[in-house]
Amino acid sequence: MSEQQYLLEMLDIDKQFPGVKALNHAQLRLRPGTVHALMGENGAGKSTLMKCLFGIYTRDAGTVTMNGKPVAFTSPRDALDNGVAMVHQELNQVLRRSVMENVWLGRFPTNKLGLVDSKKMYADTKAVFERLEIDVDPREVIGSLSVSKRQMVEIAKAVSYNAQILVLDEPTSSLTENEVEHLFKIMRRLTAEGVGIIYISHKMDEILRISNEVTIMRDGQWIATREAADLTKAEIIRLMVGREMTNQFPPKNNRIGDVLLDVKNFSGMYEPTCHDVSFQLHRVEVLGVAGLVGSRRTELLNSLFGYFTKSKNMFAVGGNTEAAAVSGVNVAKTIMLVYLMAGVLYGIASFLEAARITAVGANTGLNYETDAISAVVVGGVSFSGGVGTIQGVVIGAVIMQAIVYALQFLGVNPYIQYIIRGLIIILAVSIDVRKYIVKK
C-alpha cells in the first residue's frame, strides 16, 4: 500500500477505570478512502478506544490528530460536528417516532417561522436513502421496522453528517447475508469518496474480505497492524490470543445426562416476545440459544426466569423435585395448588354424582353430617332461619372440600381435621349471629 497522509492518528492512548486499565498505550492509524478493521477478543479495548475518539470517554493520556491537527472531542455532538460519526452495536433510537425524525434528531430542519420543516426533512431523508439504496419509508415508525432495517437507518444517519471518518461497531451482527452485501456496497461507495472507515467485528471472513488494513488489540494494548491481504485466520487468532491455537475446537467428552428441563410450546405474553418455543436441557449440558439480533433470544430467557410475563407454557420436570427447583419452579407451592384444585374438582364431582343417584343404601351419607352442615353454613344459610341458595351451598361444599384436601396434604391428623372443620362451622355461625344482632 502506497504511503499517504493519515486521516486519523491515535497514539499512546491510555484509559483507566476503577481497578481496570482498559487502554494501555493503544494506537490506531487510519488512511483516507480505506477500511481499517479493529480486532481483538472481548475486553481487548476496541470499543473503549473508539469511545475515546468519539467523545464518550475522556482519554487519560495520548494524542489524537485528524488531518494532521490535534483534536479532543468533548462529546459525541462535538465529534459529529467535526466529521466523525459512529454506529454503535446497541441501537439507541426513539422507537415511537418516525424514521426521518430519528435520522435528524437534534438537528431538525426549520422554516422561516422556526417550526420544523417536515417536507424538507422527508426530502433530505429520501435523498440519503436513495444514495445508499435503502428501501425504507422515511415516514414509517421506526419501532415497526426489523432490527436489520433499523441498523441500516442508523448507518444512513451517520452518513448524513457527511463524516470523514465512520466507525462501525459490529454492524453485521443483525444483518442477513444479502443485507451484509448491501452494507459492503455502501462501504465501498463511501471509501471511493475518500471516507475512512473503522470496522469492528469478530467475523474474520468479513474482515479479510472488506478491509485494507487490520489492527489487532489484546488486553488494552496495540499488538500489530498488518495489511489484510497478508493475514490469515490462523495468524489473526494467534495475534489476538497471544499463542498458537493448535486445538481451536477440542473434542467434547462429557456425557449428557437425564432431562433436567423440558419446555414445550412456550410463549411470552406481550410483544415483542417469543412464540411456541420448545427445547430440552439435560444434565451436564451446555445448551446454546442462537439467532440474529431481534430473534427474541433475550425475551425467551427473561420470560423463562419470570422477568417478563408468560402466556402459555408447559414445563415437564416429572417427579424430580430437584430438577423442578433448578428450573425455577416453587415445588411446595405447586403441589399445594394441585391438592387445592383436586379438592375443588372433587367437590364439584361429588355434587354431580349425588344428583345422579336414584337409589341409596341405608348407610349412604353416614358420617357426612359434618360435611353437609359445613357446606350449608359456609354457603350462607343461617341457623336463625331463612332460605339459602343452591349456589351458596355448592360454593360452601367446594370450599370445605378444598380445605379437607389441604389438611390432608399437610398431614394433619384426621381427628384434628374434624376439629378444624367444626371450628369453621362455629366461625360461620358466629358471623351469622353477629349479623342477626346488628339487624335487630
Image (cartoon, rainbow, N blue to C red):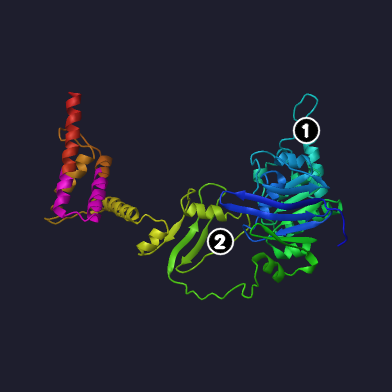
Residue 80 lies in quadrant: top right
Badge 2 marks a residue whose secondary structure is: loop
Q: How far from the left and from the top, in percent, is residue 231?
A: 76, 68
What residue occupies the far left of the structure in this picture? 362
Q: Is residue 87 visible?
A: no
Percent position (x, y) of residue 436?
A: 18, 28
Residue 297 visible in the displayed image: yes
Q: Residue 133: percent from the left, percent from the top?
A: 80, 50
Q: Distance between the Cα atoms at labels 1 and 2?
A: 44 Å
245 up-or-down from 73: above or below: below
| Range drawn in magenta | 396-422
Q: Using residue 194 as the reference point, say whether residue 100 is left or right of it.
A: left
- The residue to which callout 2 is attached is 289
Secondary element at image label 1: loop
Identified by mark 2, the residue type is Val
Q: Main SS of the magenta segment?
A: helix
- Residue 412 is one of the magenta-drawn residues: yes
In the picture, the quarter occupied by the C terminus is top left
Q: Which residue is disc 1 drawn over? A: 109
